[in-house]
Image (cartoon, helix red, strand yellow):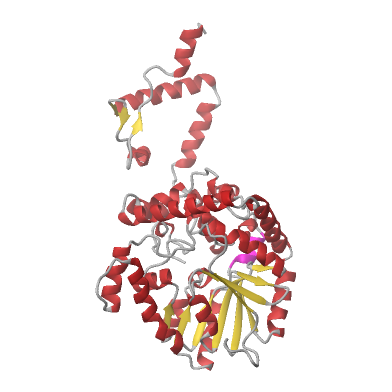
Amino acid sequence: MTVTPVTFVERARQAVGSDVARSNRVGAERLAGLREAARQAYPAFDEMRDAARQIRLHTLAHLDDHLQRFADQVERNGGHVFFAADGTEAIGYIQRVIQDRRVRRVVKSKSMVTEEIALNHALEASGVEVVETDLGEFIIQLAGEHPSHIIAPAIHKTAADVGRLFADKLGVPYTDDADELNRIARAHLRRIFLEADLGISGVNFGVAETGSICVVTNEGNGRLVTTAPPIHVAVMGMERVVPTAGDLAQMLEVLARSGTGQGLSVYSNIVTGPRRVGDPDGPDELHVVILDNGRSRALAAETAEILACIRCGACLNVCPVYRAVGGHAYGSVYTGPIGAVVTPALMGLDPWADLPFASTLCGACRDVCPVGIDIPRMLLHLRRRAADERHHPFRWVAPGLRAYRIAATGPWRWRAFLGLGALAARLFGRSGRIERLPFHASGWTRFRSLRAPAKKPFRRRWGERHGT
């Protein structure tokens, strides 16, 4: 899960104002605009959002029953199910399948849960070739990076960046034409699909009623990964189950609109078991790995609601912090507001205690969430825990807030506090602006200037006007 061992603040400081952050912001703003246009064009959006929320909360309340039903149906359909307590168990099972079948090449479709457990690294370390086939993930793999966005892994890269990367790694002539870059990737991957021994996918939703898995993509690679190789391994977070096929249909209504502004993603692949007699294609074996990896702990905590997330990425696109610093600043494969909750919820608050503070608490994430997750409430809960457990990323904040409380609870103390603040601001202000503040306040002016306080405060002007 870790990108670098430094704190969010240190990573963010390096990212702010960079070309990568600017590209990230442009992409996020575009996706947010598409989402809003889709919402306005779909009169039933709010009603469908409420229905999706009820489905997700009901499922979480009865998760054990739905998971067991799902697993039983997968096995009735001819598939194999393995419940993994953590990433180590999940990787171990997949490696046993690979070793028993003498697999040498694996193709993957986009999967955040396999990023979560660092599956690629483990398989490559054992001598297996792993090729990401989603275009964004393929770019990121060539670059040796982690995704910076849940649904758009390479959102921080320009066409020129990709052109240089392809020229360097694939030995093709440089181009920054998007269509040509797509053709290059397609030509490179086509042979790999046909030669792969095993395909690995994530699972957007597992349907308890039928034992089906649904993989949602905007590229045809998802279908090739799940049907062309003789073995298909699907890795599913245990929370991604829905009770019925009808519930799946409602989830798909809000997923694409929230993520990319589409009425429906281009491909909604529904896989029900391995190939049967008479089927023209499909794998001979289907293995479904259901991963816990901290989800049971999160389900029993105040952060349980975060497991309702359907990974649309809408909260990232509207978050002012994410827009300013990009995804890599979070140090986790889960970025933005959702990452600020789900990473400490799954992996423990320490060493992720700084992530809940990476938010303005503006509430935009809650407003756009297709299942209405109250992310700000959980961020506040995690901040409170961090303070109680002395994991606060800024040691000076607690004494500073205590001083503020003392000043703000007495009228004469508050007036004195404001007077001192105004005096200090005048000392540091020039031409009505404060360009630089000292010590812990320096963060407020590192990337901007502040308006200096008025020489005559509002309270005094009010008193002079009304004689009070």
* 291 horizontally vs 431: left or right: right
Residue 280 visible in the picture: yes
197 within the magenta span: no
Among all residues in the image, which is located at the extreme front?
41
The percent coordinates of residue 347 (x first, y second) are: 54, 64
**Extreme residue in the top direction:** 467
Horizontal and vertical percent position of residue 332: 46, 62
| 381 to the left or right of 326 | right
Say left or right for 19 vs 235: left
Q: Nearer the viewer, residue 414 or 378?
A: 378
Q: Main secondary structure of the magenta part?
A: helix
Q: Is residue 337 visible?
A: no
Stretch of the chain drawn in magenta: 294-300
Q: Determine if the magenta segment contains residue 299.
A: yes
Q: Residue at x 48, y 76 (%)?
A: 221
Asked whether, in this view, residue 396 is left or right of residue 348, the answer is: left
Q: Nearer the viewer, residue 313 or 261?
A: 261
**Relative image position of residue 80 (x, y in whole percent):** 64, 85
Q: Residue furthest left?
A: 173
Q: Measuring 54% from the left and 66% from the top, which residue is drawn there?
A: 265
Judging depth in this view, the residue of 336 and 42 nearest the camera is: 42
Out of 310 and 404, give the one closest to the viewer: 310
Task: Decide: is 352 above or below 168.
Answer: above
